[in-house]
Image (cartoon, helix red, strand yellow):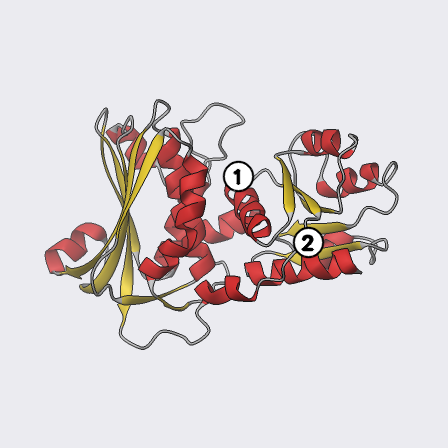
Amino acid sequence: MTQRLLAFSRRQTLDPRTVDVDRLIGGVEDLLRRSVGPNIEIAVVGAVGLWATKIDAPQLESAILNLVLNARDAMPDGGRITIETANKWIDERAAKERQLTPGQYISVCVTDTGTGMAPEVIERAFDPFFTTKPLGQGTGLGLSMIHGFVRQSGGQVRIYSEVGQGTTMCLYLPRFAGALDSDDPSDDEATLELGQGETVLVIDDEVSIRMLISDVLGEAGYRVLEAGDGPSGLKILNSDSRIDLLITDVGLPGGFNGRQVAYAARQTRADLKVLFVTGYADNAVIGNGHLDPGMQVITKPFPMAVLAQRVREIIEG
């Protein structure tokens, strides 16, 4: 929650780099398609000669995934999602409407054919903790995080929607005229440490984070099991399933946090290796100054290549 509120208030730590957004979307396109299920079609429409922007690439990936998942939820009976990029010249009149400085921007728009949003919902959509989803199915922080991240990056988010006609969410990001960074984050997957069929259990209540970790580890050669809360994770851990590594978020719903799940699991799996994932400082997780052997911590945000390397090291260690 602290990390999300920092994002909303535009106070989080960002790592902006020059990014080709079409290339970035291409890198997560397969994950997006698997995220929405067979009843929803995804169309990606890239712009010819799309300008570069300077942005925190993992945050942008997370924002696009979040928008796609929201679009999916707005189409329970299926439909179509279009992800489109474009170069935009924002003149003074348009800039005033969007609360931007006039100039050159790129746009990333996610459009669905879903239920749409009423004006009063649009007005509150970026408010922290506001959600139209049932209790337990949404925190109301996803759009507020996206809004804060994009505004902190010098851009803007706009909603265009009609009830029964669908919704378009557009991110406007400032153009960067320089060259792309040579260590473009989209190249991280080329250096992934590969697994050898080991089984990894991933426990995280954030669907987008859990899916991203599972997708990356699956492509790296691991067999991945997933759980969205502590009790579900413990049920898997108490089964006969082979588990070589537990990756768990520290803050979990359902009455058991990540530490409690790990230590409960070690009652029956004494040698279980554990990697805690947290958005807090390491010592806030460790508490008493140390972790038991076979336990490590990785602090968010982190590149996927770093996660894969840490997983390989823990399993081999």
Q: Is residue 128 visible?
A: no
Q: Amino acid at mark 2?
A: Gln
| Residue closer to the observer: 13 or 37 | 37
Direction from residue 245 to residue 89 in the image, left or right: left
- Residue 38 picture quarter: top left
What kind of element bears circle 2? loop
Q: Residue at x 65, y 33 (%)?
A: 229
- Above or below, 118 against 64 in this view is above
Can residue 218 be seen by looking at this rendering?
yes
The quarter of the picture where the N terminus appears is top right
Q: CA distance from mark 2 to mark 1?
A: 25 Å
How far across and how far down the image is residue 297, in percent?
Answer: 71, 56
Q: Which image quarter is the C terminus in?
A: bottom right
Residue 15 or residue 75, whichever sits in front: 75
Counting from the top left corner in percent of width and height, residue 12 is at 49, 58
Find residue 48 and report its image quarter.
bottom left
What is the crowding at mark 1: few (fewer than 14 residues within 10 Å), some, or many (at least 20)? some
Q: Is residue 36 above or below residue 220?
A: above
Q: Position of residue 54 (x, y in %)?
A: 36, 67
Left or right, 298 with respect to 188, comes to right
The residue positioned 81% from the left and 38% from the top of the image is: 265
Residue highlighted by disc 1: 207
Q: Residue furthest front?
A: 196
Residue under pointer 2: 196
Q: Earlier in the sequence, mark 2 or mark 1?
A: 2
Pick whichever, 194 or 132, lies toward us.
194
In the displayed structure, would residue 229 be above or below residue 297? above
At a point 60% along the width and 51% down the height, the residue shown is 217
Labels in figure, total: 2
- Judged from the image, the secondary structure of the residue bearing numbered disc 1 is helix
**What amino acid type should be assigned to the residue bearing mark 1?**
Val
